[in-house]
Image: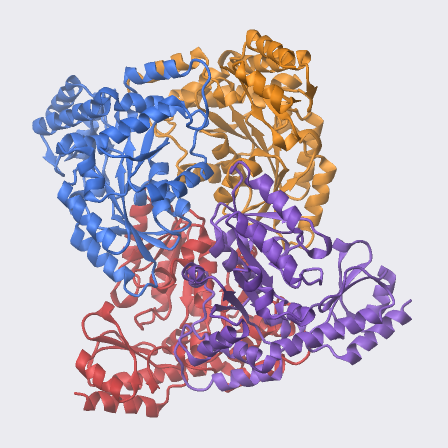
Chain colours: A orange, B blue, C purple, D red
Amino acid sequence: MIDFRSDNTHGASPEVIDALARASVGTSSSYGEDRLTDRVRERCNSLFEREVDIVPVLTGTSGNALAIASMTPPWGTVFCHAHAHIHRDELGAPEFFSGGAKLFPIAGHNGKLAPAEVTRVIGEVGREGRTGRPSCVSITQATEEGTVYTVDEITRLSEVAHRVGGRVHMDGARFANAVAASGESPAALTWRAGVDMLVFGATKNGVLVAEMLVVFDHSLLDELTTRWVRAGHRLSKMRFLSAQLDTYLADDLWLRNARHANAMAARLASGLDAEILRPVDANIVFARIAPERARTIREKGFDFYDWPLFGEGAVRLVCGFSTTERDVDALLAAIREAQ
Amino acid sequence: MIDFRSDNTHGASPEVIDALARASVGTSSSYGEDRLTDRVRERCNSLFEREVDIVPVLTGTSGNALAIASMTPPWGTVFCHAHAHIHRDELGAPEFFSGGAKLFPIAGHNGKLAPAEVTRVIGEVGREGRTGRPSCVSITQATEEGTVYTVDEITRLSEVAHRVGGRVHMDGARFANAVAASGESPAALTWRAGVDMLVFGATKNGVLVAEMLVVFDHSLLDELTTRWVRAGHRLSKMRFLSAQLDTYLADDLWLRNARHANAMAARLASGLDAEILRPVDANIVFARIAPERARTIREKGFDFYDWPLFGEGAVRLVCGFSTTERDVDALLAAIREAQ
Amino acid sequence: MIDFRSDNTHGASPEVIDALARASVGTSSSYGEDRLTDRVRERCNSLFEREVDIVPVLTGTSGNALAIASMTPPWGTVFCHAHAHIHRDELGAPEFFSGGAKLFPIAGHNGKLAPAEVTRVIGEVGREGRTGRPSCVSITQATEEGTVYTVDEITRLSEVAHRVGGRVHMDGARFANAVAASGESPAALTWRAGVDMLVFGATKNGVLVAEMLVVFDHSLLDELTTRWVRAGHRLSKMRFLSAQLDTYLADDLWLRNARHANAMAARLASGLDAEILRPVDANIVFARIAPERARTIREKGFDFYDWPLFGEGAVRLVCGFSTTERDVDALLAAIREAQ
Amino acid sequence: MIDFRSDNTHGASPEVIDALARASVGTSSSYGEDRLTDRVRERCNSLFEREVDIVPVLTGTSGNALAIASMTPPWGTVFCHAHAHIHRDELGAPEFFSGGAKLFPIAGHNGKLAPAEVTRVIGEVGREGRTGRPSCVSITQATEEGTVYTVDEITRLSEVAHRVGGRVHMDGARFANAVAASGESPAALTWRAGVDMLVFGATKNGVLVAEMLVVFDHSLLDELTTRWVRAGHRLSKMRFLSAQLDTYLADDLWLRNARHANAMAARLASGLDAEILRPVDANIVFARIAPERARTIREKGFDFYDWPLFGEGAVRLVCGFSTTERDVDALLAAIREAQ
């Protein structure tokens, strides 16, 4: 089976396994007091061109929920895209971690929040102070619809949030793909554009299991790490998380893997004999393929998800770091033949 | 440095790394819909001599808190030993996950809860129904004090819990050590003695990072897995957790590692030129070593924790799966010489 | 000043004060074990034409939040109108009491939920089970827009909820006004139409401070009362709440007060020299009165709230149980003159 | 029946009913924007000899839980007496409101916390930071055992709390009785002795239903009032709560009622033909009366609670503001005769 279901069906880069093997020899201090965790922090300082705090986690859901909870009180309101993963795919994790904050889903073209619409909704919600306190704007980069925010778009959303005393969270499950797609630096796409906290994904892009909270406002760290421990997300043998992240950041593995996945999606889009439903900025192609045709393609050994949210016949085709040109070309051929 | 600080400072058995390397090739279904996760379930069915449900997690804290939250309402009361990890070392994780349940710490000799005392406290707390609803008795096996409950002790505690409609949680961070020490079967020490849910530890005993909730009452599964997802503890690439657990259970690696660690602790205890403060049932030795003497030993390249809870000069010496006879003998010699 | 700001600015019917005076003599059992509380229960059985459970509370917010929390798990999803009080005016009380449930606001004409739209949203949210579990549909009767649901409308919404295993909550802050307006019986508007729990308002309609949860599904009572105690909403001297409710239900005070308030609103609407923005089913008139004109009216000694949610120049005029024909006629004259 | 069960079985002083009757005429602004609420604030400023913030509530449980939640994070630890109402009689309200804080019950003679023991427990709990963050010491004044803390005792407990960055909460359900008993000023017993927030009880001492949070640290007000609204404890028709509190504070009604209740308890204690189990500082007498004898007394028309917590045959006899000398003398006679 050739797999276009998700980037989380892919395995891990061999370098990552090697790093784990090295880290598993001998004993080491627990709870992050180890050399590898220190090195991840240093690599992030360098990558983001400033001092940052990092908190390694194991899932995007926990990273997002911890970030939001540390930036919003129980009576806070969080503004996000109507299709945002934090709202639609995490079974209420942000509500759980924050003690009951309220998520306000906002519609937006191509998976992006529009600053004017966010301003309008915040204004309406915040007017009398009876609904909640505007506390966070959450941006997904790359978006759930496979598009990538520009630096200017992020900057304007951050301004909207900061104007009402709110914070900016970036769900970067596919942050590497966004960096690769935009050609912008990690710094430009985050803190320089006003982002307060980033969940920097790695799981979908070549490691076994690892994500990393990157904190740009040091004053948030104490509460964040307290919540992290209390939620059972701090590993005693942290070095095994750090070993993965260290390898991910070394020699630009994160960027190389993302560039490759993006290139595969571009190749797929450019050869596709079907309607493309969203701009292909990163590593995902949404297309319309009639159910009968899709069945034929699946019978030939390909797999991918239907995406009814985008209308009848919509499917999602995801390229991962281990998708090959051969995989893409085979799919393109199968689609053509299934006409 | 020779390390007796904790079993979580040790690395991983080489078989576990090999399994991860194998699992990282190609793509695989996400969220536990994979072959390795199925096999872990089958191995557990066989090991526990009945059908069980399993839920893999990454930390003991999350396992304990999820288990307790799925068995106790927000207004429940949980009865545990005064030194229990869930009460003293998890920053309130059970309270967080359960939505505010109340933990009742109960003193007990050698780290064990005594059924009569638990009965008395539950009676007092439950009398008027104004404090909370007795919902759970939590047993640590092996205990925080390095001792191991007998089947009979567990059975009697379970009866106390069940008599008031409560459940029994077992924190088995060192369950393998308890099985190795007691010579009892996993079934005898758990469901046959009335345990409703076990957190079966692996992290401290030879894998990278993995624990496993073993559920003996199927009716608890739906709420448990819902909480697990909502807390961000379900891995998308679950197979990397399952690969570790599969290897852990295959060929009795879990039991061999635990037997070895226990044997090292026994060797240490039997040769120790110092007062031993608790029975050495499993892999931990608590001893009294005067601060000056301890300093000398540390200067010779050994490390271990002071344990002020057990009085002046108390230290904790932990043997792990990778502790060698040579390590133990070197420590024994250092202790003698530091006289 | 003649007051059209809200029905909660009005005082209490004299009968209610008399009842409190009688109840304050001597001693009486606490926590609801008193004769008055029993009598309220009996009156409700009779009024609702079946056995019901009742739980007296002091605010609509606590009544709504307790009702919802007892019918929805922390991972539940609650579907309500976009302008619902529970979503927009209670600072997240339902989220707090439920432990983080998710409210899904749904737009609807004249303040009413449309069954087809609720079906659509539940379908989308519930499809993959990754967002939450559909657990409750909340209906406001009379609505925030001053309209009243028909029995048929309620029945169809209940069917939508029950079809997915959800429950039906009715926020009846102005339930008396809805009964008075519709000519339907309390039974017809609630349990016969599928409602599981009603918050029967009294505060806005002639008592000092009192509301009442009316529970039609006895299996919900245990959790509901536990939550009620735990939230500090059970009064030790409950008889002072029950004395009010007893008087409210005796001799149809609740219905007479509501009929009067509705009649005053009808009188106001029929004589109004301004655009009326919503159907005037109950005791509230929404009208468009230009800001300059509104200022003139206020200067003549009337008060009422602007209602920007309904567009420029929108105002809300509320009649209470103590609004007189003279008050209404004076306002009508002032509006005409302010032309 | 002559009632010694609790002070919450008593009714209300006639002045309070009169005040409610006056307040129920006409309309008034909602949510505390009224003249009566202002006047309560002014009376408190004068009574406490400084500017204070006040938040009226309806139950002691909600007052305590709101106070504690506004002074302790979800991961905070609260230190209180083992018999404290907040720990034993509120069904986990502090845990619910705080989002899962941990209460540490501490044994203490005559219902009082001893500073040295509190220091010891905080030291043990706080040592490694793995249990929670010491955030609050809670003092009950008068205590659950009918005793009254001295100014010096409160001062020393406050020092213990403040030394670790914690706050001091005073559960003053019987604060009036403590003031009457000690002859100290309200200021001396609270903020001058380091108390950060007081729940000033009125329900048990002559009003219908009302308590009042008195806040000595203004920085706590914003979070406190937010939590108050979110928990459904802010009344729309606040003036009916304020009318009671206004009357309670005017002409020292609060103090006169408490002095009377205390005097009745003293009269009871001094004439009692039975073992007295605790010092009778305020309005409660704990005595040992054998079950047979107690039954005889009850058959003569008296009622009171058994108090098994204080040993076999222990009973609690509570005098309220409406207990008369005749009631007391009749009970004394009945006890003598029941010999």
Most foreground residue, B94 or C158: C158
The furthest residue to the top: A326
Residue D212 at x, y percent in the picture: 50, 69
* A131 versus A259 height, above or below: below
Q: Is residue A241 left or right of residue D108?
A: right
Q: Is residue A56 left or right of residue A134?
A: left
Residue drawn 57% across and 72% down? Answer: C209
Do we see residue A186 in this rendering? no
- x then y, percent, for residue D85: 36, 64
Whether residue D137 can be seen here: yes
Residue B175's spot in the image, x, y percent?
Answer: 23, 33
**Residue in the picture at 58% in, 26% down:** A306
Q: Quadrant of the C terminus of chain A?
A: top right
Q: Nearer the viewer, residue D220 or A200?
A: A200
Image spot of residue B288 (x, y percent): 15, 36
Above or below B34: residue C28: below
Camera-nearest residue between A102 and D320? A102
Look at 61% across and 24% down and name the residue there. A291
